[in-house]
Image (cartoon, grey):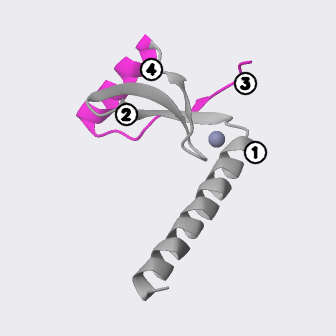
Amino acid sequence: MDKVRQRIDDIYKEKEGLQKEFEELQNNCPHDLYKIGLFSWHVGNISTSRLCIHCDKYLGHASDIEDAKFTEEQVNGMGKTVYSSTKEK
Ligand SMILES: [Zn+2]
């Protein structure tokens, strides 16, 4: 097997391992605190969303109030508000 082929296969394996660890961390996170940030569903579509401050997981759309606060913070260069979340299920 040539060197490039070998390295490419190693990288695939590494990415898979990292992806698994990433998902495990998100699955075991309490998501108890979140901030408002921009989340992209797909190219050309960005919305203000609740993102876990620990693991960056998307936790739902920002409310109108959170959305307004986010815009205000962006415009004024203020620090981002951290919100407390109660687990919804
Ligand atoms: Zn989390």
* Amino acid at the residue labelled 3: Lys
Q: Whole-Å distance between the Cαs marked 2 and 3?
A: 23 Å
Q: In the depicted view, which residue is nearer to us: 19 or 4? A: 4
Q: Earlier in the sequence, mark 2 or mark 3?
A: 2
Using the numbered discs, state the Cα–Cα distance from disc 1 to disc 3 in whole angstroms: 13 Å
Instruction: State if disc 3 and disc 4 touch (CB < 8 Å).
Output: no
Where, quadrant-wise, is the C terminus in this rendering? top right
Rendered residue at 44%/86% (across/down): 2
Which residue is painted at 57% across and 69% down in the image?
14
Q: Earlier in the sequence, mark 1 or mark 3?
A: 1
Q: Is residue 40 left or right of residue 56?
A: left
Q: Is residue 55 magenta?
A: no
Q: From mark 4 to mark 1, how far is it between C-alphas?
A: 26 Å
68 vs 76, left or right, is: right
Give the residues drawn in magenta, as a range.
Answer: 64-89
Q: Nearer the viewer, mark 2 or mark 3?
A: 2
Q: Most extreme residue toward the front, as rendered?
A: 1
Which disc, if any, is residue 66? Answer: 4
| Callout 2 secondary element | strand
Q: What's the distance in space between the residues labelled 4 and 2, CA to CA? A: 17 Å
Q: Quadrant of residue 85?
A: top right
Name the disc covering residue 28, or none: 1
Q: Position of residue 76 (x, y in %)?
A: 26, 34
Q: Residue at x 47, y 15 (%)?
A: 63
Residue 74 belongs to magenta span: yes
State the separation of the CA atoms marked 4 and 3.
18 Å
Q: Secondary structure at mark 4?
A: helix
Label 2 sits on residue: 40
Evaluate whether residue 82 shows in this view: no
Q: Where does the image place residue 86, in percent across and percent down from the top left?
A: 71, 23
- Amino acid on which disc 2 is placed: Ser
